[in-house]
Amino acid sequence: MVSTLIEQIVNGIVTGSVYAIVAVGMTMIFGVLRAINFAHGEYYMLGTFGAWFAIDYLGLSYEASIVVGILSTIVIAYVVGQLVMRRMVGAPAESGVLATLGIALVLQNTVILVFGGGYKFFSGGYIEPVSILGFSLAEQRVLILVVCLLVFIGLELMVTHSRMGKAMRAVSQNVECCEVVGIDVPQVVLRTFILGAALAALSGVLTAPVNVSVYGGMGELITFKTLPIIIMGGLGNVRGTFFAAMILGIAESLVATYVGLQYRDTVGFATLILMLMWRPHGLFSTQARF
Amino acid sequence: MTHTLTRRMLCLSTALLTVAALAPGLAGEAKADEAPIKLGIVAPMSGPNARYGAFSMHGAELAVKEINDAGGVNGHKIELYNADSQGTPVEGVSATRRLIDQDEVDFVIGDVSSSVTLAMQPVAEDAGVLLLNAASSNPKITYGAGVGGFKWTYRNYPTDENRAYVVAKYAAEERGFTKFAVLSVDSDYGRSAIEFTKKYLPEFKGEILSEDYYKEGEVDFRSVLAKIRDGGAQAIIMYGLADTTPIIARQMVELGLAGKVTLVGNGEFNTEKTIASAPTALEGAVEAAAWLPAWDSPESKAFVEKFTTTYNEAPNNHAYVHWDTVNLLAAAVREAGSVEREAVRDALSKIKYKSPVGEVTFDDHNQARLPMILLQIEDGKPSIKGAFTADIQYPAN
């Protein structure tokens, strides 16, 4: 009984890691732009497609495909960032919603037009099971967990110590003052956006081996799983996002075990509603942003 | 100023619209020497079931090409139109309306998904267009057809009830399973298959230990598989989606269920790709399908060969049933000696059509009497265990 519970918590943490890497990018973009990026799941999808393309068409190894997936997403994110995202600085909130929803549709349908709407089979990755503390896990999941921790340690260091991190925090606090002191706001927005998209792509490439199927519409589901996480984490809060993702991952895992798999997708928004009733500002105070 | 402009625009656009409305009529008159048979296909061409849709279209296209190349049906060529249902009832209904209102088809074949087909039935009924289903297995579709209600719905596909019975019987009697866990897709197809499994399982002293349904697009089955492992089930009854089967099979390997718990049900367990994704998890899996490429009949073998050379890929069940259903429709038109909808419908009710899996006739619920083919994965290859027919007991209404 207890061992089942622990195993499910471990499962939840692994699921949470995937959510966390995607959500942290989305939350940082919200921080600098004050806009929810509804196309965020599409970068997750693009990363996976890039890697799948590298393996199936170019015959590369899984390791190389990770690089291809992330780099191709960065190129697309750069174009989208230049054309769309940097224009959204200071724009009203509804233009952000429309623009990112539009981008989501364009990216998704372009991929479907180019590669077809069917499921692709992702063949790379380390799928052999290993036994840790008596639980059987695919090696890939251990990798996801480790990468997630590294990503969050790296991001913490970046936002507190590096010049770009400090600029990001400044932009998220007050755009006008940044302009006064000479911070190039559109540039910061563009870089944050590309970083966020690259992290989403990384998450996609890492999960592809265990999720097996790759298809054009796969990003949508991720966007809607991440939305409650970033709200719970306190929009724009890196550390908060990490814990919110873990809470959601574990809650989903427990619901799937003890209530039923069919209720899994309701967990995210149900937890969100409960949490908003208790702490309307998010689990972590908005003061702690970044 | 603004007013005059608006009025002028209105006149202009009205004139343009009139021309546009007349144009297709003119074009249609010009080329029709013998009236074509207008056939619409509703299938999921995008979304999570897009693969089914692509196979369905290819199957139908191949049949249409064969028939037209041979001079058509009594001189009438078949014109094929397609519409994307995206696998959802809402889109399926508007796709059907588009085919009926804009393309003015007389016959519709569709959809793959039972939920979509159920929503399409009243649309076809109102328009008096023949809806010939080729791939949905929910029993409700023909419970409510023929003497049950919808006069324009026919189905050339065996139902979940038939399938559930055949699978439960084989799993219990031949394999000796008594403890089952359910893991099916959360749709009209997945849920009704389990409903009928529950109806028949007590006959074979089987019991269900746990019951879970997954949403389309679900990728994480670790929690539920761990529960199944700890619950001590011998087999998982799965009526699922082909694209999800490899994900579940791989996670079964991950959790150490492979070789200990057997998959039984339906969800394309037998394709090469699926087996290759997790050979140990699929070994011994039992599946009931309306058709499979290994089926031993000359017509079926010829179809597999032709399909493979045309599309560079082996056909699946959906490709076959759509190919076969187009042929069935052609046979009905031939029998009727007319392309009139009523005549074709009446011919269909009385038809004795020779399909590659056996002779097809329709009962008073417009349901084709068809066998289910049962197979088991042995040494990484599907091995056919036989074809079984079960008579459908319609509920009194």
Image (cartoon, coloured by chain):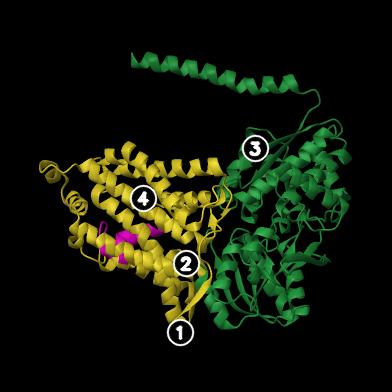
Chain colours: A yellow, B green
Residues flagged by tags 3 and 1 on a common chain: no
Tag 2 near tag 3, CB within 8 Å: no
Residue highlighted by disc 3: B99
Q: Which chain is home to disc 4?
A: A
Label 3 vs label 1, nearer the camera: 1
Is disc 3 in the same subunit as disc 4? Answer: no
Nearer the camera: disc 2 or disc 1:
2
Q: Residues within 10 Å of mark 1 (few under 14, many from 20)?
A: few
Q: Quadrant of the C terminus of chain B?
A: bottom right
Q: Which circle, 2 or 3, is nearer the viewer?
A: 2
**Gap in Å between the C-alphas at discs 2 and 1?**
22 Å
Give the residue number, with chain letter if any, for mark 4.
Answer: A197
Q: Mark 3 and mark 4: span between their CA atoms? A: 40 Å
Kind of residue sitting beneath label 4: Ala
Picture coordinates of residue A125 (x, y %)?
A: 51, 62
Q: Is residue B106 left or right of residue A197?
A: right
Q: Amino acid at mark 3?
A: Leu
Which residue is label 1 attached to? A3
Checking the image for residue A140, the label placed there is: 2
Report x, y in % for residue A265.
Answer: 46, 63
Above or below B351: residue B67: above
Report the span colored magenta: A224-242
Q: Of helix, strand and loop, which one carries label 2?
A: helix
Secondary structure of the residue carrying numbered label 4: helix
Q: Amino acid at mark 2?
A: Gln
| Label 3 Cα crowd, 10 Å radius (few <14 / some 14-19 / many 20+) | many
Q: Amino acid under label 1?
A: Ser
